[in-house]
Image (cartoon, rainbow, N blue to C red):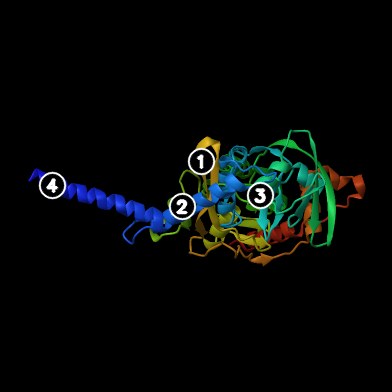
Amino acid sequence: MFKRFLAISTAVLAGFLLAQYAARQQGAPSWWPDRDRDRQVRYFKEVLQLVKENYVGDAPADYASLTRAALDGMVGSLDPHSEFLAADAFRETEDELANAFTGVGIQVEQRDGHIVIVAPIPGTPADRAGLQRGDRLVKIDGKALVNPTLDSTISLVRGEPGSLVTLTVFRPAQNRSIDYPVRRERIKLESVRLTGMRAGGVGYLQITQFSERTGEEFGKALAELEAQGLRALVIDLRNNPGGLLDAAIDVCSEFFDKDELIAFTQGRSPDTRESYYSSNGHRKRDYPVAILVNGGSASAAEIVAGAMRDSKRAVIVGEKSFGKGSVQSVIELDNGEGLRLTTARYYTPSGITIHERGILPHVEVEVSPEDEARIRVQQARPDLAVSTEDDFKPIEDIQLAAAEEVLAGVLASGK
């Protein structure tokens, strides 16, 4: 009996080894669970070895460099928001989510092979210099960007605090290139700023991006305005490039009832849906709210605008938002490296997707990029409104004025 069992076991082992050999030589048989993956990995290893052994040129061709270049190309080819993060870039990503980093203060995206400014962050060197959303970065310190990636471009823009970098942008609206010498700073931002009470008891809050402290900062600023007799509120999300989903949920929770749906995400499979509900702990707020958006309002900013619009808690004023409705998960890898990977799509409470559609305003008010840049300068430097420095002429913020007019009408009607 033992000999028979040994003979069967030997046959099984021989069959398994033959199957492995066949998988290596001719591709895995039909019952092999990940045959296509294994075939492609084998193909990649063959190419990696060929390049390592035969490439002659200036580019590094060691295994580590080739593997990271392959990872960069693989992840970067998926969509404009996914990327492989080298150790330095991964640390910078974590800094940005904590709302502190060294640079000039621009949010950029890769579109159609170009590095495009989504929005300069208000109050930063880039904002003060006059860079505009839609500007394409074409040179950095006089060196042309050829086949640029987000990672490589950001690393060129970043540098030591106090150092000078010259950004050359192409501005489509003017069909010309412009040089902007900008001095880098250690940028530690308050995400909720420019708070104050305007005429008629209308409060004003600007959220520049959604970071770890945004919910706390927003709640505190809102409480201060309410203590001053707030009757209506403008939330300015213009040129807010987004950030953390949790921060957007925290902001919406100030106006939603407990356990009310604010947004949900849907991943690749049906069971990956994740719903986000409001928390409790705030007083009931039933005063009218207007939210300002434009083409630079993206991601988490669109979650807030979409949720408040869906639930009829706010009137949306301005221009159609950017339309970035995808969720990026930041995943830590070995050696301090990481991935920023698109893993789901955002949806408003009623199930409307934001991706590539944006949030449409109830009251559409268009502002040219040039006027928008001047308004941002006025916001960053209120002293210019009463000075003649550089022949600066203040202009009316017609989007803010339209929001105030809508709120005044609601207050006057008593609704």
Q: Are marks 1 and 4 in contact (CB under 8 Å)?
A: no
Residue 96 vs 398, above or below: the answer is: above
Residue at the location (59% across, 48% down)? Answer: 51
Instruction: Kindly report the distance in space between the C-alpha atoms of the residues bearing marks 3 and 1.
Output: 18 Å
Question: Closest to the observer: 413 or 20?
Answer: 20
Mark found first going from the N terminus, 4 or 3: 4
Closer to the eye: label 1 or 4:
4
Tag 4: amino acid: Phe
Q: CA distance from mark 2 to mark 4?
A: 36 Å
Assess whether mark 4 and mark 2 are in contact (beta carbons under 8 angstroms). Answer: no
Label 4 element class: helix
x, y percentage for residue 2? 9, 43
Q: Which residue is mark 2?
A: 42
Q: Which labelled disc corresponds to residue 5?
A: 4
Q: CA distance from mark 2 to mark 1?
A: 25 Å
Of the numbered discs 2 and 4, the one sitting upstream in the chain is 4
Q: Amino acid at mark 1?
A: Glu
Taking the image as drawn, is residue 126 in sight?
Answer: yes
Three-letter residue code for mark 2: Arg
Q: Check disc 3 and report its element: helix, strand or loop.
A: helix
Q: Alpha carbon of mark 1 to alpha carbon of mark 4: how far?
A: 48 Å
Of labels 3 and 1, earlier in sequence is 3
Residue hosting label 1: 332
* Residue beneath disc 3: 150
Q: Sequence order check: which comes first, mark 1 or mark 4?
A: 4
Disc 4 to disc 3, how far (Cα)? 61 Å
Residue 278 falls left or right of residue 141: left
Q: Which mark is residue 407?
A: none
* Coordinates of residue 206 in the picture (x, y in percent): 67, 48
Picture residue at 63% right of the left edge, 44% below the top: 225
Circle 2/circle 1 CB separation < 8 Å = no
Gap in angstroms between the C-alphas marked 2 and 3? 29 Å
